[in-house]
Image: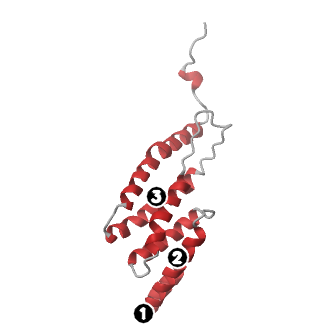
Amino acid sequence: CSTAPTLILLEDDDFSVAQLELQSRVYENVLSPRLWRLVTRILHYSSLSHLMRSLPFLTACLGHLVLHTTLFGMERSDYSKRWVEMDVPAMVDEVVVSLFIPSMQQLDSGLAHCAALCTLRLAHACPNASWIPQACLLVIFVLVDATVSCNVLNEKMATLSAL
């Protein structure tokens, strides 16, 4: 008759594996679904000022998820339990294609400038995404238009430094 292993036998000497497991479960089960709900809610905003305030926060969250979900350092051979990958790049693609690109196509709005800066940040986090050429072309149009419309040299320098 075999007995169940005790907690002492199951205790792992390497605490980093348990920490990585907990971190991956939080990212998979908490952050990603809540961020999807946030993206859905933001896509339905009708107020431009609310959208302009929420885009930098959304961009920071997506950039953090992109950079940190791929840096767990856990291989299937090292991590024997269930392995689930979040589809964060698909979430970023959805946000850029359905929110940032249409916002940048309205060249005369402050929302276009905000979306352009957020797109640059996500392009840095996802350098191989399929939307990069189209989005970066729109970013250039928006920021050049913002530079031309600036009358003060300090404002032009700030816009050019973003490029």
On screen, 58 above or below 84? below
Q: Which residue is label 2 attached to?
A: 139
Q: Which residue is label 1 attached to?
A: 151
On screen, 65 above or below 52? above
Q: Earlier in the sequence, mark 3 or mark 1?
A: 3
Q: Amino acid at mark 1?
A: Asn
Mark 3 element type: helix
Q: Is residue 54 left or right of residue 100?
A: left
Q: CA distance from mark 1 to mark 2?
A: 20 Å
Picture residue at 50% right of the left edge, 55% below the top = 91
Q: Which residue is label 3 attached to?
A: 61
User: Outermost residue toward the top?
Assistant: 1
Please indicate, yes or no, whether residue 120 appears anywhere in the rendered image: yes
Image quadrant where one finds the N terminus? top right
Q: Looking at the rendering, which quadrant does residue 19 occupy?
A: top right
Q: Amino acid at mark 2?
A: Val
Percent position of residue 83, x then y: 59, 38
Percent position of residue 62, x then y: 49, 58
Mark 2 element type: helix
Picture residue at 52% right of the left edge, 68% below the top = 121
Foreground: 102 or 13? Answer: 102
Foreground: 15 or 26? Answer: 26
Q: CA distance from mark 3 to mark 1?
A: 34 Å
Picture residue at 57% right of the left edge, 45% below the top = 85
